[in-house]
């Protein structure tokens, strides 16, 4: 299989027709201190006693945002991203999720717009167990955030999650660029490596969209009234065709299974109709999907000589 490192590539970063540079993206990790206040930090080793909804971390995990959209990752056994729709371009994540606001309700900046439940969420990594797309499971977890003028990055390690007959380890990098709604993902898995997948929540009644069976990068997506604001939202996952063993659905998630479960590379993105400049119709969303897949194909990569394990497509 060909593995690659994402490089900074301007065509994906700046929206067509934009006259000035967008605000710098931001990765945020906001942790409760001993006195009950929250502090922005650049890393955390999650305590073993951390529980879902215990308020230790604002937004329940790290978040990353561009001027277009924001995402957060549940920093627990779920280990899947969620979507925050943005109506304003400025960075908002450092100010929310500390127990003083309800980010599930509409605010001037936007809101949490997605329902994850037990699915793979918005581009989450999981394990195919008995034909079911499952969330990662309990592990020792740490996270770091990195920021510069062009990109925001979150690095998460999950050590000792339930693998194939024993524990496995996962290291994942999420990155968003200025002017983009796309998150790029690279992950490495070691130990008792199971069948690794990445996927999207499949809500009832949504229009399912798949890319043509051609091109180096392909996608699957859904469109419809699936936002928590009860309006249209499109979600998509993009993957290299020659690194995918199969795609499928278990009724709750759409997913891609990777040829080499030790090395995962893909991207995901969402488009909410209340975001300025976002696709407003299914037709416009489909065009964004095709344009993004084509742009990913044109990006330069640093390619290794790792053996290709998938059959030719």
Image (spheres, rainbow, N blue to C red):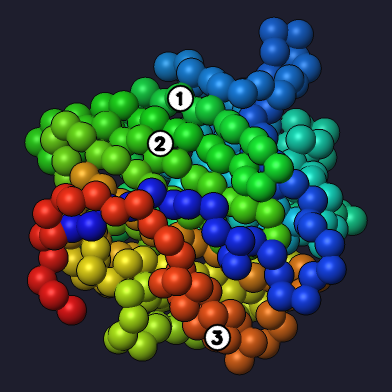
Nearer the observer, 21 or 118: 21
| Residue located at (20% from left, 34% from top) | 190
Secondary structure beneath disc 1? strand
| Residue located at (17% from left, 45% from top) | 194
Q: Is 29 rendered above or below residue 124?
A: above
Say left or right for 176 vs 273. left
Mark 3 against mark 2, which lies toward the viewer? 3
Nearer the observer, 116 or 248: 248
The residue that mark 3 highlights is: 286
Q: How many marks?
A: 3
Cα separation, mark 1 vs mark 3, equals 36 Å
Q: Is 266 rendered above or below residue 80?
A: below
Secondary structure beneath disc 3? helix
Q: Is 41 rendered above or below residue 234?
A: above
Q: Counting other residues with Cα less than 10 Å from the Cα at mark 3, is it few (<14), some (14-19), or many (20 or more)?
A: some
Quadrant of the snapshot with the C terminus: bottom left
**Label of residue 91 in the image:** none
The x and y percentages for residue 1 are 18, 58
The x and y percentages for residue 279 are 69, 80
| Residue located at (59% from left, 65% from top) | 12
| Residue located at (64% from left, 30% from top) | 29
**Label of residue 77 in the image:** 2
Q: Quadrant of residue 213?
A: bottom left
Is disc 3 in contact with disc 2, using a CB cutoff of under 8 Å? Answer: no
Q: Earlier in the sequence, mark 3 or mark 2?
A: 2
Cα separation, mark 3 vs mark 2, equals 33 Å
Q: Earlier in the sequence, mark 1 or mark 2?
A: 2
Cα separation, mark 1 vs mark 2, equals 12 Å
Mark 1 against mark 2, which lies toward the viewer? 1
Q: Is there any visible trace of residue 81 in the rendered image?
A: no
């Amino acid at each position: 299989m060909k593995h690659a490192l994402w490089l900074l590539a301007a065509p994906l970063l700046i929206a067509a027709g934009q006259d000035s540079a967008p605000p710098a993206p931001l990765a945020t990790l906001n942790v409760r201190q001993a006195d009950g206040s929250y502090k922005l930090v650049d890393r955390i080793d999650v305590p073993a006693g951390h529980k879902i909804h215990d308020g230790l971390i604002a937004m329940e995990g790290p978040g990353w945002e561009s001027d277009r959209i924001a995402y957060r990752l549940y920093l627990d056994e779920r280990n899947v991203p969620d979507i925050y729709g943005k109506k304003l371009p400025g960075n908002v994540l450092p100010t929310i999720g500390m127990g003083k606001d309800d980010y599930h309700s509409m605010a001037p900046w936007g809101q949490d717009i997605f329902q994850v439940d037990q699915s793979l969420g918005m581009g989450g990594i999981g394990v195919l167990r008995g034909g079911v797309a499952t969330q990662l499971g309990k592990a020792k977890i740490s996270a770091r955030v990195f920021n510069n003028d062009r990109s925001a990055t979150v690095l998460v390690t999950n050590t000792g999650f339930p693998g194939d007959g024993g524990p496995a380890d996962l290291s994942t990098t999420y990155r968003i660029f200025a002017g983009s709604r796309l998150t790029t993902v690279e992950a490495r898995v070691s130990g008792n490596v199971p069948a690794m997948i990445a996927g999207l929540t499949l809500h009832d009644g949504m229009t399912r969209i798949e890319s043509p069976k051609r091109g180096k990068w392909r996608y699957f997506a859904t469109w419809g009234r699936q936002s928590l604001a009860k309006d249209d939202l499109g979600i998509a996952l993009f993957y290299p065709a020659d690194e995918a063993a199969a795609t499928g659905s278990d009724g709750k998630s759409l997913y891609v299974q990777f040829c080499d479960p030790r090395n995962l590379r893909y991207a995901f993105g969402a488009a909410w109709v209340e975001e300025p400049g976002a696709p407003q119709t299914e037709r416009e969303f489909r065009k964004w999907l095709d344009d993004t897949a084509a742009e990913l194909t044109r990006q330069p990569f640093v390619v290794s000589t790792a053996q290709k394990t998938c059959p030719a497509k």
